[in-house]
Amino acid sequence: MPQLDIAALRLAVKEDRYLITLHAQQRMGQRMITHADLKYAVANGDVIEEYPDNQPDPKALFMAFVRGEPLYVACAFDGNYAYIVTVHRYDPGKWVDPWTRRKA
C-alpha cells in the first residue's frame, strides 16, 4: 500500500503539478474558490484526514483558513501529480469544529 508523502504532495501543488477533477472545478465555480485559494490550503493547511487506502492513489484532506473561513481541499497523490478531488467550505452540520468531522 502506498504511503502518502505530504511534503511531496505540497511541493507538487506548489510547482503546479496538479490536476483538478471536473467535480472539483464545478465546486470551485459554485463556491467561488480560486486556484490561489486551493494552493494556499494545501501549502499551509492542516492535514485533518488521511486516506492511505484510497484507490487508485492515497488521499488527504487539508483545511486552512482562507479569507477568515475554513476551506477544505481533498487531494490524491500518485507520487508525481496531485489530483484535486473536491473543495468545500465549512458546514456546521457536518463538522463539530473546523478540524473535527461529525460522526454519522
Image (cartoon, rainbow, N blue to C red):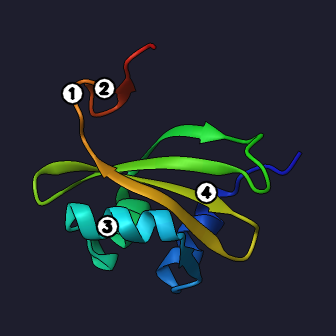
Using the numbered discs, state the Cα–Cα distance from disc 3 to disc 1 in whole angstroms.
19 Å
* Secondary-structure class at tag 4: helix
Q: Kindly check if marks 1 and 2 are in contact, taking CB atoms under 8 A apart as contact.
A: yes
Task: Read off the residue under disc 3.
Answer: 28
* Front of the two marks 4 and 2: 2
Q: Kindly check if marks 1 and 4 are in contact, taking CB atoms under 8 A apart as contact.
A: no
Point out which mark residue 6 bears: 4
User: What residue lies at 34% left-to-right and 61% top-to-bottom?
Assistant: 27
Q: Kindly check if marks 4 and 2 are in contact, taking CB atoms under 8 A apart as contact.
A: no
> Is 13 located above or below residue 27 in the figure?
below
Point out which mark residue 50 bears: none
Using the numbered discs, state the Cα–Cα distance from disc 4 to disc 2 in whole angstroms.
23 Å
- The answer to whether residue 93 is left or right of residue 17 is left
Residue 14 at x, y percent in the picture: 48, 79
Task: Read off the residue under disc 1.
Answer: 92
Using the numbered discs, state the Cα–Cα distance from disc 2 to disc 3 in whole angstroms.
20 Å
Using the numbered discs, state the Cα–Cα distance from disc 1 to disc 4 in whole angstroms.
27 Å
Answer with mark 2 or mark 3, whichever residue precedes in sequence. 3
Instruction: Give the quarter of the figure containing the N terminus.
Output: top right
Answer with mark 4 or mark 2, whichever residue precedes in sequence. 4
Residue 7 at x, y percent in the picture: 60, 63
Disc 4 crowd, CA 10 A, few/some/many (<14, 14-19, 20+): some
User: What residue lies at 38% left-to-right and 56% top-to-bottom?
Assistant: 87
In this view of the protein, which residue sits in the foreground, 47 or 70? Answer: 70
Using the numbered discs, state the Cα–Cα distance from disc 3 to disc 4 in whole angstroms.
23 Å
Disc 1 crowd, CA 10 A, few/some/many (<14, 14-19, 20+): few
